[in-house]
Image (cartoon, rainbow, N blue to C red):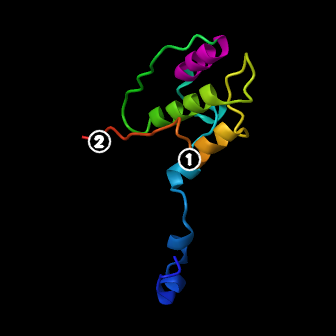
């Protein structure tokens, strides 16, 4: 960053400071924040609470319906260290949740199937 032209830094400061994209910055972090898809949320939350999780989930549908967001919250809830035994919401405070929020977790690998051909 120190090798950038000073004129470029003055004209485009937002490009230098921008660290996360908008869709990641404003993405819901808990099941309670996910809008709509109540039937999916309720089913997944009940499976987490009872501890009877299937070996795989398949999220499909048109873009913009919350497939990736739901999968990320599910992964966070499953790996959360502070989540109670009968709870389904991730805490967003433990090291595992913070790593997933920052995109630094090795337990969560997001693959965009549309561009991975």
Nearer the observer, 81 or 28? 81
Residue 114 lies, in percent from the top left, at 30, 40
**Residue shown at 29%/42% (left/top)?**
116
Q: Is residue 3 left or right of residue 17?
A: left
Q: Main secondary structure of the magenta part?
A: helix
Residue 102 lies, in percent from the top left, at 59, 49
- Which of disc 1 and disc 2 is earlier in sequence? 1
Residue 89 lies, in percent from the top left, at 68, 28
- Against 46, residue 79 (above or below) is below
Quadrant housing residue 60: top left
SS label for mark 1: loop
Residue farthest to the front, as pictured? 106
Disc 2 target residue: 116
Give the total of numbered labels. 2
What is the magenta range? Answer: 39-50
Is disc 2 surrounded by few (<14), some (14 to 19) or many (20+) residues within 10 Å?
few
Is disc 1 surrounded by few (<14), some (14 to 19) or many (20+) residues within 10 Å?
few
Disc 1 target residue: 104
**Residue shown at 62%/18% (left/top)?**
48
Nearer the observer, 77 or 21? 77
Quadrant housing residue 42: top right
46 magenta-colored: yes
**Residue shown at 55%/47% (left/top)?**
103
SS label for mark 2: loop
């Amino acid at each position: 960053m120190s090798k950038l032209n000073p004129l470029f830094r003055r004209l485009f400061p937002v490009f230098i400071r921008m660290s996360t994209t908008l869709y990641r910055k404003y993405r819901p972090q808990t099941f309670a924040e996910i809008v709509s898809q109540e039937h999916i949320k309720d089913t997944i939350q009940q499976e987490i609470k009872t501890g009877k999780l299937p070996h795989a989930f398949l999220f499909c549908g048109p873009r913009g319906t919350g497939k990736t967001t739901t999968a990320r919250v599910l992964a966070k809830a499953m790996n959360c260290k502070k989540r109670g035994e009968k709870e389904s919401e991730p805490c967003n405070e433990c090291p595992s949740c913070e790593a997933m929020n920052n995109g630094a977790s090795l337990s969560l690998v997001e693959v965009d199937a549309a561009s991975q051909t």
